[in-house]
Structures are given as C-alpha cells and as structure tokens.
Image (cartoon, helix red, strand yellow):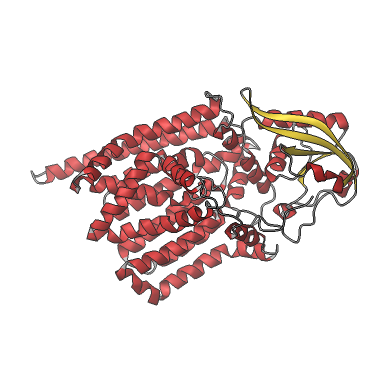
Amino acid sequence: MTTTQDAPAEAGDLKTWTYERAVFATIAALVLVRLIVAANMPLAGDEALYWRYSRYLAPGYLDHPAMNPFFIRLGTMLFGDTAFGVRLFAVLTALPATWAIWRSGAVISGQERIGATAALFFNLTITMGVGSMLATSDASVVMTSCFVLLALAKLNQTDRGIWWLAVGLTLGVGMWAKYTTAFFAFGIALWLLMVPDKRKWFFSPWPYLGAIAALLVFAPVLMWNANHEWASVAYQSSRFITHQFKIAYPLELLVSQIGLATPSIFILAVLGVLWSYREPQFRSTSVLFASLVLPVLGYFLWHSLHERVQGNWPECITPALVCAAAMAVHLQESQQGSGAATARWSNRLAVPVALLLVTLVYAQAIFGLIPLRRDPTSRLLGGGWPELAQSIDLMRERVGAQVLLTTDYTLASALTYYLPSHAPAEQMNDRVRWANEPPPPQALFAQQMLYVCKEPCRYASQLGNRFADVERLGAAPRMRRGVVVERYSVYRVRGQVRPTLDPMYPIRTKASDEYVL
C-alpha cells in the first residue's frame, strides 16, 4: 500500500517509465528505417573509398585512421560486398552511441527522463538520420564522442580522478575514428581553466595518466604514420595553410550546423547552455558543453574563410548539442519571458520537424522526387555510379584496356567497387593513399589503358607528358533520374614516356606546389 505522499512520486515514476518506453520504441523504429534505406541505396564515392581501404586493413590511412574500415570489413564478412554489408556497422553504431547519450543526459541532469530526451534528440538529428546511415568515419566519430561526453559527465558528477582514465581511453579510441577528436583535448583544458573548482586537476596526476592512456591506445596509428613518413600528419597539416581568405563560406557552415542538428534542437541547445550557466549546480556542465563545441566550431569557422567546409566535418559536437538541448527542456519550466516561450515551441516542434526533414531526405535519396541538377543526395548516396561504371567498362572492353587510370581517389574507389568486370582502377598520383595495398603489376601498364576524369579534366592536357599516344574516346555521364550529375571524359592512352604511377614518396599535399602530371 502507498501513502498519500508516495502517490505523486509513483505517478511521476510511471509517467517517466512510459515516456522512456515510447522513446525506446521510436529510436528502435528509426534504426530499423536506416537499415532498410542503407540496404537499398548504392554506395557513394566516399563510401567506396573506405570499402577499398577495408580490403587491406592497417592502423592508419592517408586521410583517416582505421575504425571505419574495420567496421566495413566486419559487415562485408557477414553480408558480402553489398551496400548493406558495407553500411551495417555504421548504422549499428547508433545503438551504443544512444546508450552513452542517454546515460550522459541522466548523469548531467540527475533525471532519467532528461537522458531519454537527449537520446531521442540525438536520433532525430540529420547528423544521425543520414550520417549514421553512411559508411564513412562520421558514424564512428559521433559514437566515440558520445562516450567521451559520458566519461566527462561522470568525472564532473563524482569528482573522482579514476574517471580521467576513462576520458583518456575514450579519447584514444576516438582518435581511431577521426582526428578531429583531438580538439576535445583543447576543450577539456578550456573547461578546467574556466571552472574554478576544476583547476585543481592541473596539479593532479590523474589527467596526465589519462593522457598517457590515450596515447597508448592511439600508439598503433602513430606507429603506422612513423613508418609512412607521417603521411596523415602531412595531409591534415596542409589544411592549416591559408593561401587566400574568402568570406563566402562561414555563414554556409553555420547554417549547415543548424540544419544538421535541426533548427528546433539547435535553438534548445543554445538555450540549454545559457540557462544551465545561470544555475549554480549546472554551471560546470554548461561550460563543459561550450568547451566541447567552441574549439571544434571555431577551427572550422576559421578554415571556412579560405575553403568550403562540409557540414559533417564538425559532427563530433553533436553529443554536446543534444544534451544541452535536453537540459533546456529540463529547465524551461523555471524560466520566464521570450526564451521560455521559444523553448516550449522548439520542444513541441522538435520531433515533428526532425521527422519531416529526415523523411524528405530519405524520400529524395531513394526516389529523387525533385529533379535537382545539384542534388546533394546524389553526391552523398551514390546516385548514378553503377550506370557510369557500366558505361566506362564497355569502353574498356571495346579498346581492350586492362586497367583504368585516374587522378581522383573517389573515382578510383567507385570504379573498383562498381566495375562489372572488376578491372583494376589505379590512381596515378597521391600514391601514399594506397600504401596498404600491394603495388599493381607493372605489366598492366605495358598495354592499352583508359584514363578517366571528371569534367572539366584538370590534367587531360598533360597526358602527353606520360604517354606517347593519347586519344579521347568520348564522355560518360553520371545521371540521376534523367538529370546529369557529373560528366566524365575517357581517354585511351598507351606507350609510357614516364612511369604511369607516381612514386609513393615524397608525399605531396594540398600545400605543395601545383601538381604537374
């Protein structure tokens, strides 16, 4: 029997339990939909790159570490080289990531209901709706970022130094997913500096033991780089070099972050940071959210001044954003004025707006309802690649070429995946990208070859520097429902004047002098 005082508490517990079950069912349905969509969309060029990486596993690759290729290898071992096999574990990363977000929200707020709200918001973002469906490093780094946040939330809650080891381990694992995880180290230092009662950790051995743990986990990737002339370091550091400033892209980046989070969740995240800071018991949490977001966003805003930044590049900030948004829901009842009204409306609209946006993206990706010439889903989800590969393969058969050449790693990867004949497709430049693959037989280059390039072909006029005989055979379009997405020129080449493939070293980066074929 319950007392009168116990009844309201039990009623609240029942309401929370029912809400949690509804959230769980919604998340399960969303993951199932992603699996279905992932199985029915052709691979994009970037996914084909990771698939090609996965055929020759190693701790490191030129542009990314190895977590995503390992996941792809596991999926293809189970389901073959199919879209479902390649994408399976990218989609399934949502499950441990959701658990970590749920626990983070509950630890930060002290309420399971807020943890459930954070998990729901997390799965409603476009970052998860699309990003976790693609076999790129995005899904991996978002998952590991969720566990970094959980370790920091437990550290903030318990104030026990042992949690620094968990922070270090999750950072180290995150560096196996994507190098942007390194920005969290700056964010954590900023958090300690900005919160007075956290500054004591600068004088404790625990953070430094955590750093050692991170380095030990990350050591195989470092060793791979050391054995390959620090290829990843050279590649990533080239992004820091500025040739000219442009002001066109920062606004585009900010808009993309609002869109990927969905407008309602982004608004709630901003309010959650501001309102949490006003509450003494949540001030450290507010600074933590800001510290995990601002270094990442600040760097990419700076980077966008001289080069377009893809909206998914700062995706590791998503866990902090959705937990901050859930905190806004938690705190809105105690707020007054326009901010409280905005939060209430954003909370009401969060689910329907997010579901509408995700549904539109999926419908466009699968059915191409709107015939856009620059349809972003054609780039993201591989529209037209199978047909393009078949057209190029027919040209190859007509001239008797044994190998396809290109100067584009995306094209080389997509052709390797999609060519019906499985003829080799080799990138002539940037050879360190394929350092983990066995070198192709030189006999391939003693015969007729095809060179394929996306129009306008940057290096076509220089083919004579490498080959005695060059002939343009024609062009093949990549199309999506009758709309040309891209067009590719095809050349027959033979008679090596110089070696067909560049040497692997020295490494050429974006900061190098203009490349000459």
Please name whichever residue, 59 or 414, is drawn nearer the observer in this view of the structure. Answer: 414
Q: Is residue 53 above or below residue 285?
A: above
Task: State the residue at coordinates (83%, 44%).
Answer: 463
Which image quarter: residue 507?
A: bottom right
Task: State the residue at coordinates (58%, 49%).
Answer: 68
Please name whichever residue, 217 or 283, is drawn nearer the observer in this view of the structure. Answer: 283
Question: Quarter of the image containing the N terminus?
Answer: top left
Describe residue 458's horizontal placement relative to residue 151 as left or right: right
Q: Is residue 423 above or below residue 172?
A: above
Furthest residue toward left: 4
- Where residue 495 sits in the image (x, y, percent)? 91, 44
Describe residue 483's horizontal placement relative to residue 194 as left or right: right
Task: State the residue at coordinates (40%, 56%).
Answer: 149
Residue 100 seen in the figure: no
- Where residue 392 sits in the image (x, y, percent)? 77, 31
Describe residue 237's horizontal placement relative to residue 247 as left or right: right
- Where residue 427 sits in the image (x, y, percent)? 75, 46
Which image quarter: residue 230?
A: bottom right
Number of callouts in the render? 0
Residue 220 seen in the figure: yes
- Where residue 115 sits in the image (x, y, percent)? 32, 47
